[in-house]
Image (spheres, helix red, strand yellow):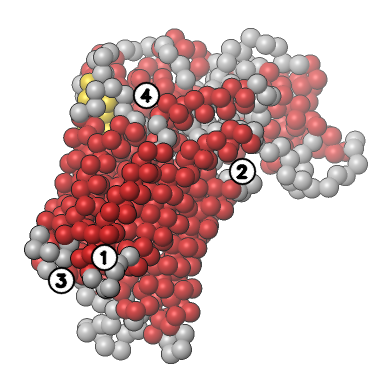
Amino acid sequence: MAATKPRITVSIKRTADGSSLTGELNSLSLGFGIFQVWLFMAIYNSSKMFNASELVPGFPFMPPELSIYVLVSFLVVGAICLLLIGATNQLLLRFYVSKRALFAATLLCCIGTAMQYGGSAPGMGEMMAILSGSVMGIGSSLLFAIWGTTFARFQFATIVLNTAISYVVGIFISVACANWVPAPISGLVTVLLPLLSMPILMKMIPRPYYQRHEEPIFHPLTQNRVSSSQFLARFGFPVLVVGVTLGALRSVCIGEVLPSGSLAVQLVFGISCICSLVIYIIAISLTKRDLFWDTLFRMVMPITMAGIASIAILTGSLDVLASFFISMGYVCLEIMLWVFFAGIAQQFRISPVFLFGVGRGLLELGSVVGSIMVNQIGIDGNPELKLAQAALVLAVILSIGYAFLPRYREIRSIVSNTQAHEHAEAPVHMWGAVAETIPGGESSQAATRIASALSSTGTLGAHGGTSPLNQPVPADAKADVPGAEDQETEEEKGSFRRRCDELSEQYLLSAREKEVLLILAKGHNANFIQEQLCVSKSTAKTHINHIYKKMDIHTQQELLKMVEDRPRLSKRKAKAAAAAAAKKEQESAPQRPKGRGIKADIFAE
């Protein structure tokens, strides 16, 4: 009997049809939380993590004054790399969705973190600090894109729950380590943190679309420049503006609140992190309709505004209270922006690589401006006037950013127009990628005919799903595919469970949704799912609704037909057929130069 892993599911609200909006707490929170610990310890609090050691006096260390070089170089280089990742989303797609990117990013983060010890080298301190921040910026930019893609696989409530827990736990642990773990233990642990999160992330990355031979489900923006520029203007400008506020709040927390050394302030900071998590759970539970990011923004904005206003009294007698609101405002805004990016990708199936590349890149650029602004605004060196002036400017900036922040309906309108334009064109199916797997990287007309034949049979629909297999395979395509006349044999049809597993993998269903799909495909209803999985009826209905939404269907009969009409041609035989057809084509045609073959214009992980 196979062992089952325990799951924690939080039912947050009930909808009109009796289902509940649920968030599933999974390993996302643990892995992403470890990543947040690394960010806070290696980048934002490096002066304490890599300080001189009293335990081992001769151990290398980084002078505290060099931490600013690490931070600035990390933000600038990371922002540039993220923007490049967003721009090259389609050109380097295969690398971004592969485990090679995860290995490379983790290695760069570990190496860049360890390079901070080079700051003690005579005459090379500044250069090593800049180089360390740059290397970590490159590695973290890749990890941001990979983590964003992983989050976009899950439902919005699951994204919110795991994001809030990961940020809160990550910041809480990093602050505790900064104050209680001595050097050099703190620095050595920081170097190893990326390696701890890599196994968790690796297990959550599905096999790339080109290995599944499926049409991806994450769509890029249309190549139409008007739609792309419209989306970037509505998405990019407010993110850049809000990033200024985020950078300023972060700078105040790290530069003013945490270094105070007061135990009361440290405890208040930890309590504010816990309160931020509670605020998000309450905000979701109070939602009376479908949950979107703009709904959460309206509920979180007053908390962030209170944090900005508290900057003005940070140096007064109410410094502990000010520290509480500043910390809570910063944590709430940090969580909200990650939820914002992942929510757009999940709800509209827009490429997470593009969204997190452009979004996080602009956010980091804005953070640099915000950090500089906090340190520069002031008159005659008066600290109280300086902080009050900074609070006023930040409040205005955040108001502008929130006013221009795109709402759900606006994004839906832009994406709907984009998808209408895309569906009017001939779709590019991932079976065309078979041509790219031929040795030598050369495509052939025969492999293209195979892809066309498979597409014409309804093997792949417009969204990577199945459609009725009621169209005959063209005769010329059958001639190119060895054994095409035997496509309906039981061996190629495969087992019932394999077809359900392939559908679950294609549409990136969660582990629980995969179990529900298997039961639904056998013809059972929500009552049976409730008894079989030991969940409430509302939770069972919620999982069913999530499956239908991801698969773009509305009834159980449509699901049964998708399982029944699952492509009969196995991957092994498809590749063998393509290779045989390509070999036959190459024997009768002159050698052609190597190329990229058929280039997909649709993204998925």
For badge 1, the amino acid type reads Lys
- Which one is nearer the viewer's eye here, 291 or 440? 291
Instruction: Say which label, 4 or 2, has the lower sequence index.
Output: 2
Q: Can you tell which of label 1 and label 2 is closer to the viewer?
A: 1
Task: Classify 10 Å Cα crowding around label 1: few (below 14), some (14-19), many (20 and above).
Answer: some
The location of residue 499, given as percent across then percent down, is: 49, 24
Instruction: Say which label, 1 or 2, has the lower sequence index.
Output: 2
- Which one is nearer the viewer's eye here, 569 or 376? 376
Q: Can you tell which of label 4 and label 2 is closer to the viewer?
A: 2
Q: Is residue 366 above or below residue 165?
A: below
Q: State the separation of the CA atoms marked 2 and 3.
A: 48 Å
Q: Is residue 366 above or below residue 380?
A: above
Q: Residue at x 64, y 46 (%)?
A: 91
Task: Classify 10 Å Cα crowding around label 2: few (below 14), some (14-19), many (20 and above).
Answer: many
Residue wearing tag 3? 261
Instruction: Say which label, 4 or 3, has the lower sequence index.
Output: 3
Are the residues flagged by discs 3 and 1 in contact, CB closer than 8 Å? no
Looking at the image, which residue sits at the far front? Answer: 380
Q: Residue at x 62, y 26 (%)?
A: 422
For badge 4, the amino acid type reads His
Residue wearing tag 2? 90
Q: State the separation of the CA atoms marked 4 and 1.
A: 50 Å
Disc 4 secondary structure class: helix
